[in-house]
């Protein structure tokens, strides 16, 4: 009842059709997703979402607000707060808060920034910006939901031709601690300073990306140190449009932890967009998944999605995307079918 009323309100609210300008140089905008999802197994699946065999109305639900202040031609600041799927509405997360200076082809930012490892890092929680309801878990869940860092970045942009642009960015992150709960245990990921480089090549409507991140981290529970990681992460991505077809693919690799990838294809038929996706994880976890969905664009900034996803995992106590240890004596779930409905919007 409450969810239905909220969906109706969001569909027809004037806020879903416009952004808010507060004076000449200040803009308030936002985004959100309201969802209903369930699996066919009682073992919860997907980190921070924990979808099981009961209908869940907040496993994918997000709400974000962003404030941008254009101070002058050289300086601007931006703040974004997000109620993520794992958060309560009363305790959202500060996703970014930075000061930016731009001069010519260069720009620099300092503060809390979005971790720029993936193709969709900048709009990670903005579901209306990509075909599916949630970013592909086989790649985007690899960093356990860590999406921001405190530090600085420096960026260079170069127009190669009228239809081609190159962007190169370096970043440095301060040491951090990130707490999360998985397998009924509270963990802390204690990371050292991190450094990275990203290169994006824009060609018409197509994007090609390569990113590199290096860091050391200790995984702890309480005062006990479980593992030490020396991470050298390489990420590759492509977003390619050919007429009404749209191809998405990303691959991440680390010698210790990851060899994960996905490929997705979407086709536009007016306001309708069917899509399919296949993904795979190896090394730290082993599973594959495939997804089929249909999206309807109500207006340019409001979309409705319905999708069906299948996840196949290995027969182990800790298995694939499942977020709870399983008992071999009572049987181990190795497959989950997930149905999801959602409405996403920006304003």
Image (cartoon, rainbow, N blue to C red):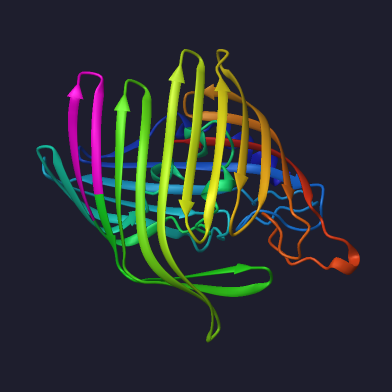
Which residue is located at x 57 percent, y 54 percent?
85
State the image coordinates of residue 81 (x, y, percent, origin top left): 41, 54
Residue 340 position by quadrant: top right
Residue 210 position by quadrant: top left
State the image coordinates of residue 176 (x, y, percent, origin top left): 38, 71
Residue 127 horizontal side relative to residue 60, left or right: left
State the image coordinates of residue 293 (x, y, percent, origin top left): 66, 29
- Closer to the camera in the image, 300 or 322: 322
Note whether 332 is above or below 345 in the view shown. below
- Would you say residue 118 is visible in this rendering? no
Note whether 255 is above or below 160 in the view shown. below
- Closer to the camera in the image, 34 or 124: 124
Note whether 233 is above or below 223 in the view shown. above
**Span colored in magenta:** 153-169
Residue 60 horizontal side relative to residue 83, left or right: right
Residue 68 position by quadrant: top left
Which residue is located at x 24 percent, y 37 percent?
167
- Closer to the camera in the image, 296 or 286: 286
State the image coordinates of residue 72 (x, y, percent, origin top left): 12, 43
Which residue is located at x 44 percent, y 25 percent?
240
């Amino acid at each position: 009842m409450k969810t239905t009323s909220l969906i109706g309100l969001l569909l027809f609210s004037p806020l879903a059709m416009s952004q808010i300008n507060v004076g000449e140089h200040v803009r308030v905008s936002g985004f959100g997703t309201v969802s209903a999802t369930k699996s066919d197994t009682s073992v919860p699946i997907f980190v921070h979402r924990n979808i099981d065999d009961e209908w869940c109305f907040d496993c994918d639900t997000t709400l974000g607000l962003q404030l941008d202040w254009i101070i002058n031609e050289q300086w601007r600041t931006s703040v974004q707060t997000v109620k993520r799927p794992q958060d309560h509405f009363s305790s959202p997360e500060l996703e970014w808060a930075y000061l930016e200076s731009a001069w010519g082809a260069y720009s620099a930012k300092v503060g809390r920034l979005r971790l720029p490892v993936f193709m969709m890092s900048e709009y990670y929680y903005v579901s209306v910006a990509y075909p599916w309801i949630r970013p592909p878990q086989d790649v985007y869940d690899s960093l356990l939901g860590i999406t921001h860092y405190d530090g600085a970045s420096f960026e260079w942009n170069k127009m190669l031709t009228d239809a081609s642009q190159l962007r190169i960015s370096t970043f440095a992150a301060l040491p951090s601690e990130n707490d999360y709960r998985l397998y009924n245990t509270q963990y802390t990921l204690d990371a050292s300073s991190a450094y990275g480089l990203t290169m994006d090549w824009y060609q018409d409507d197509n994007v090609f990306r390569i990113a590199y991140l290096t860091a050391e981290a200790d995984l702890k529970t309480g005062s006990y140190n479980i593992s030490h990681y020396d991470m050298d992460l390489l990420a590759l991505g492509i977003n390619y449009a050919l007429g009404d077809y749209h191809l998405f693919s990303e691959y991440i690799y680390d010698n210790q932890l990851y060899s994960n990838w996905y490929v997705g294809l979407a086709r536009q038929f007016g306001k309708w967009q069917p899509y399919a996706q296949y993904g795979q994880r190896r090394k730290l976890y082993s599973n594959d998944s495939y997804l089929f969905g249909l999206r309807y664009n109500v207006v340019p900034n409001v979309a409705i999605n319905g999708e069906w996803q299948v996840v196949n995992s290995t027969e182990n106590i800790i298995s694939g995307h499942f977020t709870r240890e399983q008992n071999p004596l009572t049987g181990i779930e190795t497959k989950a079918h997930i149905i999801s409905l959602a409405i996403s919007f920006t304003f």
